[in-house]
Image: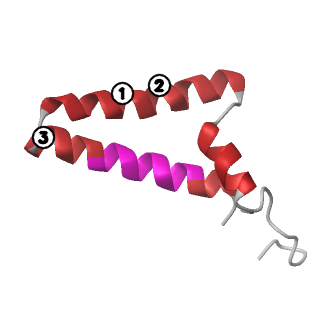
């Protein structure tokens, strides 16, 4: 998996977890959901993602290796 894939996995997981916590623990957890959504929104305009920078420093590849003519 590449950086972009991991960012989507983390964002989706954080949103689902914070929605569950907001429902069953305390409504303030919805602020975390809003934070993740706002970060995704600003990424659409600026192409800056803090998690992406962290993943790159950890050695996660940015692009897929070309494995053949059809990409599989």
Give x and y (percent) for residue 31: 29, 27
> What residue sits right under mark 1 in the picture?
34
In the depicted view, which residue is nearer to us: 57 or 34? 57
- Callout count: 3
Q: Which mark is residue 23?
A: 3
Q: Residues within 10 Å of mark 2 (few under 14, many from 20)?
A: few
Query: How far apart are labels 1 and 2 at the CA level?
Result: 6 Å
Instruction: Tell me which segment is drawn in magenta.
Output: 7-17
Question: Sequence order check: which comes first, mark 3 or mark 2?
Answer: 3
| Relative vertical location of residue 61 with respect to residue 14 in this rendering, above or below | below
Q: Are marks 1 and 2 in contact (CB under 8 Å)?
A: yes
Residue at the extreme left: 24
Quarter of the image that includes the C terminus: bottom right
Could you tell whether 13 is left or right of 27 in the image? Answer: right
Question: Sequence order check: which comes first, mark 1 or mark 3?
Answer: 3
- SS category of the residue bearing label 1: helix
Give x and y (percent) for residue 52: 66, 46
Image quadrant in which you'd find residue 67: bottom right
Q: Is residue 13 magenta?
A: yes
Q: Residue at x 74, y 54 (%)?
A: 57
> What residue sits right under mark 2 in the picture?
38
| Relative vertical location of residue 51 with respect to residue 61 in this rendering, above or below | above
Q: Residues within 10 Å of mark 1 (few under 14, many from 20)?
A: some
Query: How far apart are labels 3 and 2 at the CA level?
Result: 20 Å
Q: Which mark is residue 67?
A: none
Q: Residue at x 30, y 48 (%)?
A: 16
């Amino acid at each position: 998996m590449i950086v972009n894939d991991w960012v989507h996995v983390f964002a989706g997981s954080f949103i689902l977890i914070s929605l569950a916590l907001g429902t069953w623990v305390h409504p303030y957890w919805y602020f975390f959901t809003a934070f993740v959504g706002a970060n995704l929104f600003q990424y659409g305009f600026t192409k800056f993602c803090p998690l992406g920078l962290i993943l790159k420093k950890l050695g996660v590849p940015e692009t897929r290796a070309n494995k053949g003519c059809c990409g599989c």
